[in-house]
Amino acid sequence: MPSLLDPFQMGDLSLKNRVVLAPMTRARTGSDRVPTALMADYYRQRSGAGLIITEATVVSEVGIGWRDTPGLYNDAQAEGWKPVVEAIHEGGSLAFVQLWHCGRASHSSFHPDLGLPVAPSAIAINGDTIHTPNGKEPYQVPRALTVEEIAATVEDYKQAAIRAKAAGFDGIEIHAANGYLIDEFLQSKTNHRDDAYGGSLDNRFRFLQEITEAILTVWPANRVGVRLAPNGVFNDMGSPDYREAFTYYAERLNAYGLAYLHVMDGLAFGFHELGEPMTLNEFRAVFSGPLMGNCGYTQETAEAAIAEGQADMIAIGRPFIANPDLVERFANGWPLAPDADPKVWNGNGDDLSKGYTDFPAYREGASVA
């Protein structure tokens, strides 16, 4: 039986193990959203993972919904990613960039010249306030994208994919999860359109289909992954037809021969409770390519998922924050450091290294910086 630390052949890419650094927003760029040398250090420290999926990276200005997150919508940002990718490669890992558009989970304060956030339909998030450049503000009712704007957004993804190739990345992950723009098109809760992009499952899939096919004009299919979140409630998500919908979407994605399907099957971010949680086995039944599980996995549960054939890879997030050498700790049975204080996840004060690159690696009998 395969194990978590065994190598894995993902298409034409050889992963040294099946541990994936999950994409985690860490908010360490400046307002220009250009990756920094500090980010290169952060990813280099965690390059024990077989594959690194970067933090979510915005494809356009109107797609911005977090402060100090990186972008790939201009050439300066692509240049900034180059040393980050080089650092990951020097550590012996591979790098996929996660492409992101926040959709309604944004605010006009992030892009005052562009107005309201955009979405498939004019339905606001029902939840807490959003953190904006001006502090906490209420969520806004987004503006529904026109068909012409949808086509322009597809082009934004394609241009970001072109820049990702120029930056040296090994591949792309399309972020279609967690209540961001693509997920908003996929789910009946947030997509109330009556045109070719709404209503039926086929229509709701069309936006993701067009983005995927646009990116496939730049990258081969075995260098492109897609992330889905069938169980999630993050950003006020959860649709009554989730099981039927996400089974259909996985079936459609299976036709492309993708690098992997990344499923947020765990419930660590909450569960919409509209039925039983969807499992990896349900996706395994309709998706024949590599399957990646995520959300709340420990070493033990990850090993079980790999050994039982539920998944080929497991993405791990929060434990990697305070344990930059997480894979080495797994391999040697070394204890994990306590979870990092959430207050430092997205930066805290002037020293951006605090809670980011200052966690020590472990050596048996001692902790060393």
Image: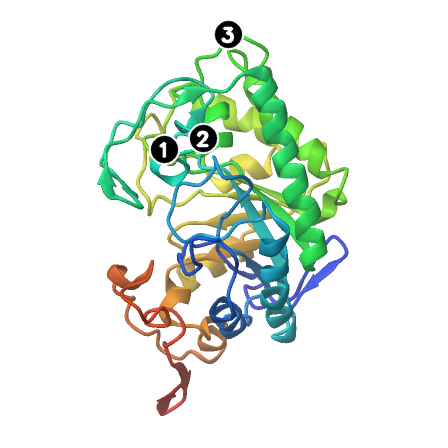
Q: Which of these two is toward me, 133 or 125?
A: 133
> How far across and how far down the image is residue 256, in percent?
72, 35
Above or below, 239 relative to 287: above
Q: Which of these two is toward me, 335 or 237?
A: 237
> How far across and how far down the image is residue 44, in percent?
54, 72
Image-based side of 94 in relation to 269, left or right: right
Q: Amino acid at mark 3?
A: Asp
Q: Quadrant of residue 104 in the image? A: top left
At horizontal 35% and vertical 26% (from top left) the residue drawn is: 275
At horizontal 49% and vertical 61% (from top left) the residue drawn is: 303
- The reply to whether residue 38 is in sight is yes
Q: Which mark identifies residue 114?
A: 2
In the rendered image, the residue lying farthest to the bottom is 365
Q: Which mark identifies residue 194?
A: 3
Q: Dividing the image into 4 quarters, which one contains the N terminus? A: bottom right
- The reply to whether residue 2 is in sight is no
Give the SS element for disc 2: loop
Q: Quadrant of residue 51 in the image? A: bottom right
| Residue underneath mark 1 | 108
Alpha-carbon distance for marks 1 and 2?
7 Å
- Is tag 1's residue or tag 2's residue first in the polypeptide sequence? 1
Give the SS element for disc 3: loop
Dots 1, 2 in contact, CB < 8 A: yes
Q: Which mark identifies residue 22?
A: none
At horizontal 32% and vertical 36% (from top left) the residue drawn is: 271
